[in-house]
Image (tube, helix red, strand yellow):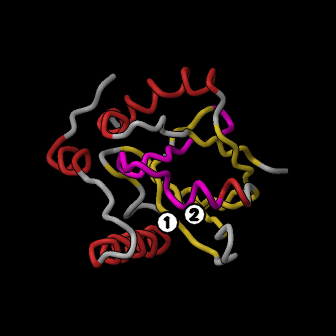
């Protein structure tokens, strides 16, 4: 069932991350940090959704720097797994967190007040075929993002670790 985008949906579907290293990118980063702070303080009640799509906090370690980072991302529940989308607003390159997860797939996510240890892997072609329509229903702007770029936007499956 498709959801009404509402005024925020129109804005977020047009949102495209600014180029790294620019003043706008620094502002984008400050907003993401603020979202992370509010998410944690409220247990996900504030910053825990965008356009009615749920948000998690993805922990990832810099592939080269080893620096710990956190990114607020939309996610889809898929059984015991969580699925995130490396859309980067339809930019030509993948987001840095994808590169980091490829180097360090064992990580942690925060879903509300719950912390989960997970292993990240890219979805197979068959999984992508099954998951993409559900992700478009969750957040229709992903279709706009895919149309903006020549790359196939990767989907990442986060599976619980024992």
Which residue: 66% across, 56% down?
101
Residue 43, disc: 1
| Element carrying mark 2 | loop
Residue 91 within the segment the image draws in magenta: yes
Q: Give left or right: position of 98 versus 27.
A: right
Determine the image quadrant of residue 29: bottom left
Name the foreground residue: 19 vs 73: 19
Label whose residue precedes the other's in the sequence (2 or 1)? 1
Percent position (x, y) of residue 12? 25, 50
| Pick the front one: 117 or 13 | 13
**Residue at x 48% of width, y 35% of height:** 152
Q: Which residue is mark 2?
A: 113
From the viewer's perspective, is residue 144 above or below residue 120?
Answer: above
Neighbour class for label 2 at 10 Å: few (<14), some, many (≥20)? few
Image: 103 above or below 25: above
Residue at the spot 38% in from the left edge and 62% down from the top edge = 47
Image spot of residue 109 (x, y percent): 62, 59
Label 1 packing within 10 angstroms: few (<14), some (14-19), many (20+): some
In the drawing, does residue 22 fall left or right of residue 82?
Answer: left
Q: Is residue 139 left or right of residue 39?
A: left
Label total for image:
2
Q: Please check the rendered image and state whether residue 81 is part of the magenta-colored stretch, yes or no.
A: yes
Quadrant in the picture for the N terminus: top left
Q: Which residues are magenta?
A: 79-100
| Marks 2 & 1, CB-CB < 8 Å contact | yes
Note whether 3 is above or below 149 in the view shown: above
> Where in the figure is residue 23, as x and y percent of width and height?
28, 78
Q: Of 85 and 99, which appears nearest the observer? A: 99
């Amino acid at each position: 069932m498709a959801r009404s985008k509402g005024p925020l949906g129109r804005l977020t579907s047009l949102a495209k991350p600014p180029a790294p290293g620019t003043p706008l990118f620094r502002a984008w980063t400050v907003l993401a940090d603020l979202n992370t702070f509010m998410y944690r303080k409220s247990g996900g009640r504030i910053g825990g959704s965008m356009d009615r799509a749920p948000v998690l906090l993805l922990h990832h370690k810099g592939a080269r720097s080893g620096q710990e980072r956190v990114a607020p991302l939309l996610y889809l529940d898929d059984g015991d797994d969580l699925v995130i989308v490396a859309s980067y607003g339809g930019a030509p390159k993948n987001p840095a967190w994808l590169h980091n997860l490829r180097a360090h797939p064992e990580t942690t996510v925060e879903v509300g007040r719950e912390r989960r240890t997970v292993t990240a892997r890219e979805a197979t072609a068959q999984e992508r075929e099954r998951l993409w329509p559900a992700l478009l229903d969750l957040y229709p702007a992903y279709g706009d993002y895919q149309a903006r770029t020549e790359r196939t936007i990767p989907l990442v499956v986060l599976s619980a670790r024992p």
